[in-house]
Image (spheres, rainbow, N blue to C red):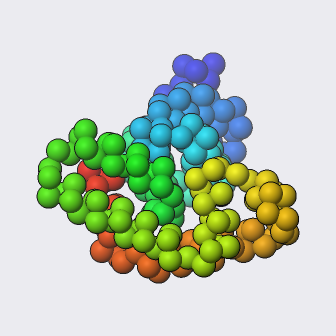
């Protein structure tokens, strides 16, 4: 029965707390949303997490949500915004910079913008290089080697909380080192790919 309902009808049922309507909305839209985020982040795991975050938010805010356009438009805009915030938070992750660089080279083609992007990449690399040695090692194991905090702690013989604190401090330092202008440039580049 639910699969025959329109998105508007499902949203009305959702506002009343109908879990089956929520499940139908999820089934109807999760794949398209995941593919949209995957195009931005090039990570299936991150795409899955972001789509889940959007749906958790929808369930929590189901009584407050007022759609100004279609449900599909609302959902696509939601995942796009969260993906951009995710990129902003993780601006210093080298694989995201490389992903953006690859996308930028193939889609933008503007040599002036590419030069600006390369400056951003060099700023981030310089900021990583300027981290204290132990913090840099922990950070690179976390970000480049994709090791969990527990794996890093075991490898380096330190407490997992120490690893967590080192990564957090590294991210704070990197964000402070990379100017607002370069963050804005990255966001503008990413926004241009939608």
- Residue placed at 63% from the left, 19% from the top? 1
Q: Quadrant of residue 168?
A: bottom right
Q: Nearer the viewer, residue 147 or 15?
A: 147
Q: Is residue 138 left or right of residue 126?
A: right
- The answer to whether residue 10 is left or right of residue 141 is left
Q: How many marks?
A: 0
Instruction: State the quadrant of the C terminus.
Output: top left
Residue in the image at 60% along x and 78% along y = 132
Residue 118 position, x and y percent, is: 28, 60
Q: Is there any visible trace of residue 65 in the rendered image?
A: yes
Outermost front residue: 133
Is 44 rendered above or below residue 89? above
Q: Nearer the viewer, residue 92 or 21?
A: 92
Q: Residue at point 46% right, 62% down? A: 91
Above or below, 83 against 25 in this view is: below
Q: Report x, y in % for residue 96.
A: 45, 51
Q: Is residue 162 placed above or below 67 in the rendered structure?
A: below
The vertical placement of 28 against 43, above or below, is: above
Q: Quadrant of residue 10?
A: top right
Q: How far across and how far down the image is residue 67, in percent? A: 44, 49
Name the residue located 85 percent from the left edge and 65 percent from the top edge. Answer: 157
Q: Nearer the viewer, residue 182 or 46?
A: 182
* Residue 51 seen in this snapshot: no
Q: Nearer the viewer, residue 23 or 9?
A: 23
Pinpoint residue 116: horizontal percent, then vertical percent: 23, 63
């Amino acid at each position: 029965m639910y699969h025959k309902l329109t998105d508007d009808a499902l949203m009305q049922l959702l506002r009343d707390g109908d879990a089956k309507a929520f499940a139908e909305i999820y089934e109807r839209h999760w794949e398209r949303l995941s593919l949209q985020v995957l195009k931005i982040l090039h990570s299936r795991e991150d795409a899955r997490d972001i789509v889940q975050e959007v749906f958790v938010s929808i369930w929590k805010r189901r009584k407050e949500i007022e759609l100004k356009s279609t449900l599909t438009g609302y959902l696509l805009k939601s995942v796009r915004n969260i993906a951009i915030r995710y990129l902003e938070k993780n601006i210093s992750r080298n694989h995201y910079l490389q992903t953006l660089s690859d996308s930028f080279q193939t889609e933008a083609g503007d040599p002036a913008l590419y030069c600006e992007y390369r400056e951003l990449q060099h700023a981030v690399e310089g900021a990583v290089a300027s981290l204290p040695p132990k913090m840099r090692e922990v950070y690179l194991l976390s970000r480049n080697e994709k090791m969990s905090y527990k794996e890093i702690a075991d490898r380096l013989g330190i407490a997992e909380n120490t690893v967590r604190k080192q990564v957090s401090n590294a991210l704070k330092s990197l964000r402070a080192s990379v100017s607002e202008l370069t963050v804005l440039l990255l966001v503008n580049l990413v926004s241009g790919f939608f």
